[in-house]
Amino acid sequence: MIKRLGIMIDCSRDAVYRVNTLKRFIDIISKMGFNTLMLYTEDTYSLDNEPYFGYMRGRYSNSEIKELDDYAYSKNIELIPCIQTLAHLSSVCRWQEYSNECVDGNDSLLVGANKTHELIEKMFKWANECFRSKYIHIGMDEAFSVGTGRYLNDFGYEPQYKILYKHLLRIEEIAKKYNKICLLWSDMFVKNANNGEYYPNEFKMTQEIIDSIPKDMELIYWDYNHTDKEHFLKQIERHKKFNNKLWFSGAVWSNLGFSPHTEYSNKCLNASINACLEKDIENILITSWKDDGAESSLFVILRTLAYVSSIVYKNDEKEIFENATGWSYDDFKLLDLPDYVYGEPSLNNPCKYGLYNDPFLGLLDYHLKEIDKDYFNKLSTDLYNASRNKEYEYIFDTIIKLCNVMKFKMDLGLITRKAYKENDVSKLKDLVDNVYPSLENSIEELHIAFFNQWIKECKFNGFEVHDIRLGGLKERIKHCREMLIKYLNKEVKEIEPLEEEILPYELNKEKGEGVLLSIWMMTSMTKPWN
């Protein structure tokens, strides 16, 4: 019997959603049968006398959080604070205000530091003042650098799980003071017992690590990209070795680019949620991460949420979606299609790496192939014909403009290099006179449409990342075109990057296998705030 069916929205990776956007989202999920909502806020909220905490990040005021808590409560949704109390705090750790006193290394706070304890107590005080819920999600995931920086210098080596235990004991004291129940991710504890693996085939666990999590804290096992129900059944059973009440968290893959990747998300969630139902897991959380720029609209995940609801409540997915939104289920299916340009849905994002792949350097050209331009032309037309509902027309407009870019950009590096290598002057002139200028204009239109989507849903902060990315992309396309002109005019004898042979992104990757990439792995465009 499911007690809590919840959603976690990432409000820390550039996008901080407006209060009215979240109210609209709450209206919809409440009709789908969800009763829990978490806003993942690393530092995008306000702490007393901490001016650098969330500085220039679009942080929520206390009044905004209280307004959301009241509204969620009126819709029978429990709003649970979801924060970080150890790692994933790079936006905090960069400030000298904290680095001098309470930073261990990279993105992690210094366990045992007075300033660390003061900061965490302020977090709990904030949660106590702004939320009705007795729960607080304290994070604790992926704290890889804990004990390896300043802690190592000051205190010497200690096994990581022992450092985590010390930290949790102090958090437990603070939680009791504010009468809060802590939720935390399980990965660091599983990894410490299994040589860094979170999903090991042979699951090991020591009593010391089991005892390192206070029993009154509740553990969340997250698992996002497996599709085999048996895998989840085994991992759930293994997690029950802990002394803690167990939650499960799956994901909707909203963090790979502009498209929602609904079909792949559903495939993973079908396996995991049915395993949870079989194993009597009472609390299920669906995360919507926005790593690497939050390009996709908040609302593109709704088809997956309807699918989750259909599994839990045994109702029709399409009916759930349309009753809750008033929108066309079939229209929304089109939003996935840009990333299907190479075929069936997978955990892959060709439009993301195709968009930012450099036409001269071609770091990902090995994994791309020439496309049928009619694919994006037809999809753009279908999206335009579908986007008649004014309420969500702006979402479709962004994807339309993406399609208009990708019909030029997806295979531009391949075509440019081929024409250059073959000294096909006619093709190079066509690229210079038609393709590159059309691409520049299309990128400008995408930039405008994307900003329109952003400002409707999010606070202004965070879009500077996309001004830099798309602005840099436009300038790079312009510069490449100018270099081709110089080459055609014999002002330069060669274009050095186009002389080099293309290598796979990884030497052990076969051609056509594809890659899944975040933008910072393949471009020098800066990301100033994350």
Image: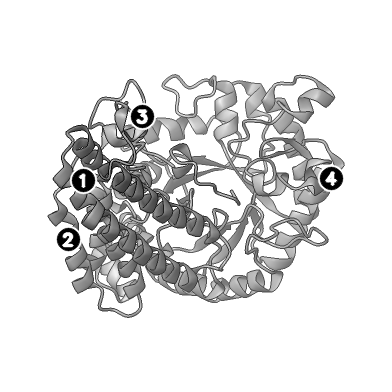
Of tags 2 and 1, which is closer to the observer? Answer: 1
Q: Which residue is mark 4?
A: 115
Q: Which residue is mark 2?
A: 377
- Quadrant in the rendering for residue 338: bottom left
Where is residue 126? Give x, y as percent.
74, 61
> Whole-Å distance between the Cαs marked 4 and 2?
56 Å
- Work out how far the residue at label 4 is from the one at label 3, CA to CA, in angstroms: 43 Å
Left or right of residue 138, residue 384 in this image: left
Q: CA distance from mark 2 to mark 1?
A: 23 Å
State the residue at coordinates (56%, 59%).
39
Along the horizontal axis of the image, is 426 left or right of 91?
left
In the figure, 475 relative to 209: above or below?
A: below
Looking at the image, can residue 248 be seen?
Answer: yes
Task: Give the mark, 4 or 2, whose residue is nearer the N terminus.
Answer: 4
Q: Within 10 Å of the Cα at label 1, are there few (<14), some (14-19), or many (20+) other Cα atoms?
A: many
Residue that carries the numbered disc 3 in the rendered image: 505
Residue occupying the far right of the picture = 114
**Mark with earlier residue (2, 3):** 2
Q: Which mark is residue 428?
A: 1
Residue shown at 69%/41% (left/top)?
A: 86
Secondary structure category for the residue under label 1: helix
- Would you say 510 lies left or right of 226 here? left
Q: Residue 189 location, x and y as percent? A: 60, 30
